[in-house]
Image (tube, rainbow, N blue to C red):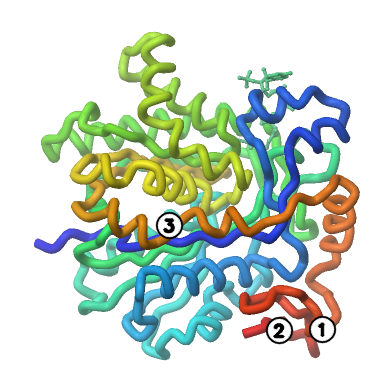
Amino acid sequence: MATIGIDAVAIAVPKGYVELADLAAARGVPPGKYVEGLGVTRMSVARAHEDPVALAANAARRLFATAEIDPGRIGLCVAGTETAVDHSKPVAAYLHRLLGLPERCRVFEAKHACFGGTAGLLAAIDWIASGSARGRQALVVCTDVARYALNSPGEPTQGAGAVAMLISENPRLLALEPGISGSYSKDVNDFWRPLYTKEAVVDGHHSVQCYLDALAGAYEGFKDASREAGYHPDSLVRRCYHVPYGKMAKKAHRHVMQLEGKNEAQADASYVEQVATSLRMPSQVGNIYTGSLYLALTSLLEAEASELEGKRIGLFSYGSGCTAEYFAGRIQAGAGAFVAKLQLAEPLADRRCYTIPEYEAIRHADSDGDRLPLSAEHGYNGSVAFLGVDNERRVYSN
Ligand SMILES: CC(C)(COP(=O)(O)OP(=O)(O)OC[C@H]1O[C@@H](n2cnc3c(N)ncnc32)[C@H](O)[C@@H]1OP(=O)(O)O)[C@@H](O)C(=O)NCCC(=O)NCCS
């Protein structure tokens, strides 16, 4: 039977970021609290032109170009997001046109806080496994602009970006394991965003506990399913987690190791070996909500794909509210050479640092970004940008 999984991946980030040490100085806290305490060095800042549609389209266009993918073979396109641009029209509808996808294509948006991208990925795997794909491929794009109120505890855990993934048979990067996963869900109030605001409401410390409870539940389910399939958890050599900020992934891994009966020293050693490389890109971008787990996976592939060929890795996705899934996959032979061709980290190199007054001005302007008057002046040559609203319709450069 053919394997199914992630064939190729690409990211897009805004053109600017804030150094967390600068933000700490402006907020009167020691830089160590943000950089070591939260595990974040920089956070991406999106201008109004860099909305979730534009970020998603730029990630997908990069995916098609670097992995040499034919858009005509896409039969399913799912956008996972919790910062959609409309209460009805999905981000995926805009993508369909901006990417030139076929009319014979199922297109929709998936929302469940940071889990929306995983919901799309699992739907794509099932679509292929069921035979509905009939040889076609699926595009899953996770895209978000994470915003908390200025001067709030959540402010240093913002970010923005998109991760595009092609899901197919005989994937070149990561074969997933349909049926071997653990789910967990519970109605909790840890993080939400009322319809009247762009800024998330969060019960921060409660959200950390909800994440850890969901991880324990999903991991137990995963272990049961793995055991039935004849796998041992020790067969996982790397573990990627949902990364709202780097320290959360460290806490998560410590929790899993505790469940495995390991002591603190063993857990810390295992973190360095199994988790640390996956946090390099997230520490440069911040929280990108639905894409955070897949940015961690991208970071791991960029750093270690060659050494990990043939090896099994674990993946944990969490969406506040809450739902979670623990699943796994195997890095494919040839992934190292393919990753070198994909130039996964390139978008991170081409960015500028905003001062704190510049960042605050962007935030104030952005609060009314959905009513941006139409203008061709955006300065993003060659990439997709949101140009403004014309007669209630959002317009994008193409
Ligand atoms: C994560 C969050 C709750 C932290 O809030 P906070 O009350 O401002 O921060 P804390 O006081 O807990 O400090 C954060 C960490 O920095 C550490 N720290 C504080 N000052 C420090 C310093 N000067 N040097 C190094 N570390 C420092 C703290 O010890 C703590 O580490 P720990 O969690 O290992 O104990 C807040 O940023 C938030 O609400 N974020 C959004 C929600 C979120 O991302 N939730 C995740 C689950 S989805």
| Image coordinates for residue 123, horizontal then vertical, percent | 35, 63
Circle 2 packing at 10 Å, graded few (<14), some (14-19), many (20+), is some
Task: Give the residue type at disc 1.
Answer: Leu
The answer to whether residue 82 is visible is no
Label 2 sits on what residue type? Val
- For marks 2 and 3, the one nearer the N-term is 3
- Left or right, 42 with respect to 137, comes to right
The residue drawn where x is 44% and y is 21% is: 254
Q: Is residue 208 left or right of residue 133?
A: right
Residue at screen point 61% across, 44% down: 284
Whole-percent x, y for residue 303 in the image:
40, 43
Image disc number at residue 119: 3
Q: Position of residue 151 (x, y in %)?
A: 85, 38
What is the distance, in whole Å, between disc 2 and disc 3 at their CAs? 28 Å
In the picture, the disc for residue 395 is 2
Which quadrant would the C terminus be assigned to in this image? bottom right
Look at label 3 and name its amino acid.
Ala
> Ligand 1 near label 1 (Cβ, under 8 Å)?
no
Q: Residues within 10 Å of mark 1 (few under 14, many from 20)?
A: some
Which residue is label 1 attached to? 374
Above or below, 147 relative to 87: above
